[in-house]
Image (cartoon, helix red, strand yellow):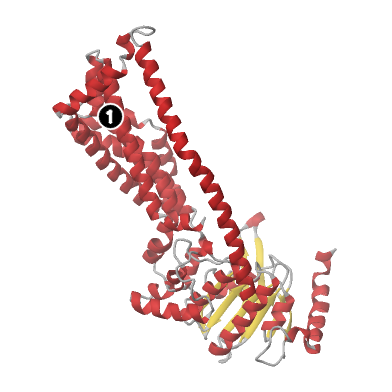
Amino acid sequence: MSAEAMIELRSLHKTFGTGAEEVRAVEGVDLKISPREIVAFIGPSGCGKSTLLNMIAGLYEATAGEVYYNGREVTDVNTNVGYMTQKDNLLPWRNVLDNVALPLEINGWSRERRYEAARAMIAHVGLDGFEDKYSSELSGGMRKRACLARMLLYGPQALLLDEPFAALDAQLRIAMHELLLRLWQENQQTIVLVTHDLVEAITLADRVVVFTKRPARVAFEQAIDLPRPRDVQAVRFTKHFQRLYDTIWQRLREEYVEEKL
Amino acid sequence: MTVRLDTDQEGRAVRSRKRAARRSAAEIGTPAMAVLQVAFGVLILVVWQLAAGRLVDEFMVSNPLAVISRLWEWIASGTIWIHVWATVYATLVGFAIGAAAGVVGGVWLGLSPFLSRLLNPYIWAFNALPKVALAPLFILWFGLDINSKIALAAVLVVFLVFVSTFSGVREVDRDLTDSLRLMGASRSQILFKVVLPSATSWIFVGLKTSVPYALIGTIIGEMIAANRGLGYLVQLAGSEFDTAGVFAALVVISVLAVIFNEIVGSVQLRMEGWKVVGR
């Protein structure tokens, strides 16, 4: 493999079940993702994008093919990635502070040290003042902030985001995009973002990868050469954004025309 | 973002006002209802007292005053405490042993699909067995003293706690355990930080439902063969045709049962404070 790829998928296959119940989720995906790159995965729902993320995270075993992370094959749970899903996965019996501090608690940090670090990170994502709230007392956006804080606290080099903002309303989503890009500017992680939202994909990503219907294969890729840092509000009204959108949308329609009918 | 936060807080304020309104409606009703409840109890006692010896044979139903004076006799002489203590001790120890075994077994099988499938038919066969029928066996094994009562209480508790713990562990959100695995958590960290806390409410359902069964196990054990305990007291009074004594012993048993349930309920409230806060 090339030295510069941070995440590399090599003729990756994933099949669930056997016999009549066999479901081919992923079929022959080859992909290289460089360090600090933000890649958006787009595809019809249920096409196997999340399965791909789960394989990068090492939660699923590939049926055939390999996943490499920093040059090493992923064979077990990949604890070097941060993972965030549409569901927030905060522990409901813990308040925000204890939820955010959880990864450090697992690593055996003392209560004082982990609380200090967690408080700083909570403030950093704009959630200060809500440390003792339980997740059921938070709005959707606040939960996302808590999840981001928790994920960033243990400093993963790569973030896997599976439709993280899908459940939020439009304004809130823009606020979260701003936050995500700000955090990315500071830490320059590699980000793989699964999304349905083409605008979100173009706004955030360096590259949009479009997948076919299940079984997922790479249909085509489109580099997003919008300059950074990006103003998530303004960028979507630029001519270049519109051109990229139209290009991808044309191809998407070709790809999913059957489904539309 | 700030705009969003404000509307959110407004929404919450409206919701909490509604909640307060609902609560105050319930609070106004509570004392009045308590008076009604007491009045109803008194009415029953008065009817009982008047009916006994007139409408119904006093030998069959005794009467409240006789029951109260029998209770007072037992309390004054102090004999009741020997029996209460014997029953409480066997119930608590039996409950503790059964609950511990049930939780451990439930967690263990809940985490091991292979074992749970292997043992499934045996567990259900054991569950179908009326456990009270084991009493003679326990008396043979553990003798006439308190150990056989403890065993019977434990065996009634263990299955109820096992089933609810098992279901609770199986219901644990896979995404939560996965997210901890990605943070590098060990198996025991996942067990103590996710599996057990999220199964807590299920485990408590099992504990709560099994408390009366622990008492049932103890009482039945005492009724079959014993020389102390409230079950023995019921049995003894019955064999002496002392109806007032039977009722007095039953009153003590139900007071015990209520106290046990209250204790479990308050422990559950304390442990699941986050749920109360959230609603």
Residue B194 visible to an observer of this rendering: yes
Q: Residue at x 40, y 44 (%)?
A: B206
User: Is B25 or B82 nearer to us in this picture?
Assistant: B25
- Mark 1 neighbour density, 10 Å: few (under 14) some (14–19) many (20 or more): some
Is B79 on the left-hand or right-hand side of A31? left
The number of numbered discs placed on residues in the rendered structure image is: 1
Residue B149, quarter of picture: top left
User: Is B236 or A126 nearer to us in this picture?
Assistant: A126
Residue A19, quarter of picture: bottom right
Q: Position of residue A11 (x, y in %)?
A: 63, 77
Q: Position of residue B112 (x, y in %)?
A: 42, 55
The type of residue carrying mark 1 is Val
Q: Position of residue B251 (x, y in %)?
A: 30, 27
Which quarter of the figure is the N terminus of chain B placed in?
bottom right
Q: Secondary structure at mark 1?
A: helix
Q: Residue at x 58, y 61 (%)?
A: B12
Q: Residue at x 51, y 61 (%)?
A: B174
Identify the residue under disc 1. B252
Q: Position of residue A238 (x, y in %)?
A: 78, 88
User: Is A57 or A154 nearer to us in this picture?
Assistant: A154
B130 versus A221 height, above or below: above
User: Is B107 or B222 nearer to us in this picture?
Assistant: B222
B64 versus B36 height, above or below: above
Parent chain of label 1 = B
Q: Residue at x 65, y 71 (%)?
A: A49
Is B74 on the left-hand or right-hand side of B54? left
